[in-house]
Image (cartoon, rainbow, N blue to C red):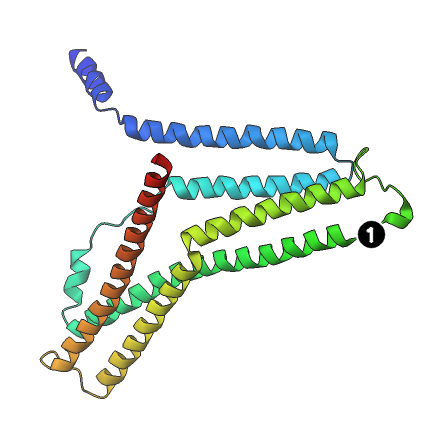
């Protein structure tokens, strides 16, 4: 009995409150998103006539799912595998280790490049489509039909102005976020690193087939130094980007305080 009480006391003392608070925050975000979705769906069904309300509800549910999975991705981390030292022993030849690292980095940076490219493409396509929709809605002329009623007692002119205002606000916010985070530059940087690593891999493979690379030759060390330089340039870019972001934030805080 005494051992059981001591074990329970130890569990209470070693309870990971950081993990508990993190899980509680994640659950609270989901609840907030769920109740917000119910609120928006209720307003949609009350203020938009059938069957158009069903299409709007479908869009709202889709956005809620995107937001939910985005929250999960932002709140979780990819589990790290333990370092496999036995696998390192297998790569006793420097050229084998070099090519293995190059292939791994190509796959990693290509994944980041694809991720940023999809973000840039989605932003540009959606901005063009929304701008076109706004232009069409504002440009349509129904004056020959009198005061055309769209939703309830709302006239089409009022509806067109409201929709154009909402679309303009969405475009402004997304453009500001894309400019702040500079996603397109991140995409180009990752793409450049991938191209450099591929070119290096091709050079290493061609030199190896030609018999120019041996463990004791200077050429292999030059390829290793070139690989380190490519990785070093990438790290220097991120250091500069973080420094610029920190300086711009500091200037903004000093301006607001003054």
The C terminus: image quadrant: top left
Instruction: Note whether 84 is above or below 60 in the view shown.
Output: below
Q: In which quarter of the image is residue 3?
A: top left
Q: Nearer the viewer, residue 185 or 243?
A: 243
Instruction: Note whether 64 is above or below 192 in the view shown.
Output: above
Point out residue 134 in the picture as x, y percentages from the top left corner: 68, 51
Point out residue 20 in the picture as x, y percentages from the top left corner: 33, 27
Point out residue 115 in the picture as x, y percentages from the top left corner: 44, 57
Which residue is pictured at 32% across the width and 77% down the height? 199
Horizontal side, residue 9 vs residue 138: left or right: left
Which residue is pictured at 61% across the width and 39% down the height? 61
The N terminus: image quadrant: top left
Point out residue 136 in the picture as x, y percentages from the top left corner: 73, 55
Which residue is tagged 1?
Answer: 141
Instruction: Note whether 246 is above or below 10 in the view shown.
Output: below
Q: In which quarter of the image is residue 9?
A: top left
Horizontal side, residue 199 vs residue 168: left or right: left
Tag 1, which secondary structure? loop
């Amino acid at each position: 009995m005494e051992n059981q009480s001591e074990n329970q006391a130890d569990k209470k003392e070693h309870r990971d409150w950081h993990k508990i608070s993190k899980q509680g925050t994640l659950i609270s975000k989901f609840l907030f998103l769920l109740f917000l979705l119910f609120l928006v769906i209720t307003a949609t069904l009350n203020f938009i006539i059938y069957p158009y309300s069903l299409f709007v509800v479908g869009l709202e549910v889709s956005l809620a799912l995107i937001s939910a999975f985005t929250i999960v991705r932002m709140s979780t981390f990819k589990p790290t595998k333990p370092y496999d030292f036995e696998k390192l022993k297998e790569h006793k030849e420097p050229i084998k280790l070099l090519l293995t690292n190059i292939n791994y980095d190509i796959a990693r940076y290509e994944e980041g490049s694809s991720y940023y490219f999809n973000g840039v493409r989605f932003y540009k396509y959606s901005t063009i489509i929304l701008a076109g929709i706004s232009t069409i809605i504002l440009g349509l002329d129904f004056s020959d039909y009198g005061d055309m009623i769209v939703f309830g007692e709302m006239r089409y002119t009022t509806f067109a102005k409201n929709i154009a205002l909402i679309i303009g606000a969405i475009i402004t916010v997304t453009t500001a976020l894309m400019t702040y985070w500079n996603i397109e530059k991140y995409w180009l940087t990752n793409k450049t690193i991938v191209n450099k690593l591929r070119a290096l891999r091709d050079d290493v493979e061609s030199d190896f087939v030609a018999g120019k690379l041996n463990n004791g030759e200077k050429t292999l060390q030059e390829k290793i130094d070139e690989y380190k330089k490519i990785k070093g340039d990438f790290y220097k870019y991120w250091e500069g980007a973080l420094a610029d972001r920190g300086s711009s934030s500091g200037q903004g805080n000093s301006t607001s305080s003054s």
